[in-house]
Image (cartoon, grey):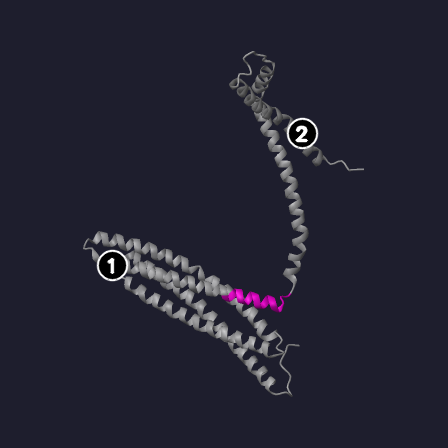
Amino acid sequence: MTRFSLRRFSRRLSTSLTFIVLFPIVSAVVGEFFIELGKEFGWYDKPSQRLEGVLTTLSALVTQSSFLVIAALLTGLTIGLWLDVALRKREAKSLLINAPSNELALKAEPGRLDNIIEGLESVEDITRIFRALAKDTNQMATIMMRSQRRILSTHDYKKRRKHATALSLKLNEFSEKIATYAPQISDATKRIHLNYLAVIEKAPVTDMSDLNSLFELAEMLKNNIASSNGTVLAMDETRNSIHAINGITRELNVSAQLISATVDALQAEVKAYTAVCDSLYSVATTRAETISTAFSNPLECPSSPT
């Protein structure tokens, strides 16, 4: 025997009531259409107005404000009940599928593929940040050149100060924007160190393919070091260019100080990233060379984690 459910009963009752209320409204609209159509085709030349009278009465009923309010309430109640059922089913399914797996994933140790993929993603994040930083810096350099030309092209000191104030606002926005990159670089650096160190030290190297992969990883780290050193030099140039605006106005002096402090913080994070890449490169090359020597000596076994 099916168990009585108040929720199911309420849903069916509201659906039935909504249908009963909405049906006259639809019928009235359709009826009015056919009445007007009949008049157009002359169906009422010899009037027999029973049907028209009934539909007119019905139309008057359903157009009353109280009737429309009740219909709207019942419609909203029905939609709400069915939506509640759909959301409850979806939520229950989501909890059933995702909750246990999420809990286990938080407790489980990452595997080699996890370390490799997360390490690559971290390097991609760093690369994306460096590209964005370079783009923002180039745009800011262009804005500074244009603003300086505007300042020097006019002999009206008030206009010069106006241009300087506009440049100061843009420099402050630039400083605020690039300041967001420092914590992102710090986070990506930590992930790179954690994941790549696990790959370098724990990944088994049993053949030349594995050894070549280790050498490729070392080469990638070497390229990352060169890239980060280039970023540090570019930030040095940015700091030097900012010195040109010192002494023009009070606002530009403040902007110069803000950018200098921001660039210092960014450089510190980039240098920390460089140090991590350098350390990982050293570990990777040392292990790769040790295994390469072992491969060249048949009496020695390839180095692999135990």
Q: In which quarter of the image is residue 176?
A: bottom left
Note whether residue 63 is visible. no
Whether 157 is drawn above or below 298: the answer is above
- Residues at circles 1 and 2 in contact by the CB criterion of under 8 Å: no
Badge 2: residue crowd in 10 Å (few <14, some 14–19, many ≥20): some
Separation (CA) of disc 1 from disc 2: 76 Å
| Amino acid type, residue under disc 2 in the picture | Ser
- Taking the image as shown, residue 101 lies to the left or right of residue 45, namely right
Task: Residue 2 in the image: state x and y as whole percent.
Answer: 78, 37
Task: Residue 250 in the image: state x and y as whole percent.
Answer: 29, 57
- Taking the image as shown, residue 164 lies to the left or right of residue 39, namely left
At a point 42% along the width and 61% down the height, the residue shown is 132
In the rendered image, which quarter contains the N terminus?
Answer: top right
Q: Earlier in the sequence, mark 1 or mark 2?
A: 2
Of badges 1 and 2, nearer the viewer stands 2
Badge 1: residue crowd in 10 Å (few <14, some 14–19, many ≥20): few
Task: Residue 75 in the image: state x and y as whole percent.
Answer: 60, 31
Q: Quadrant of residue 236?
A: bottom left
Secondary structure of the residue carrying tag 2 is helix
Q: Is residue 207 magenta?
A: no
Which one is in front, 37 or 146?
37
Q: Disc 2 marks which residue?
A: 16
Q: Is the magenta stretch mostly helix, strand or loop?
A: helix
Q: Disc 1 marks which residue?
A: 149
At a point 38% along the width and 59% down the height, the residue shown is 175
| Amino acid type, residue under disc 1 in the picture | Arg
Note whether residue 56 is visible. yes
Whether 150 is drawn above or below 289: the answer is above
Task: Find the magenta span and give its range.
Answer: 109-123
In the rendered image, which quarter contains the C terminus?
Answer: bottom right
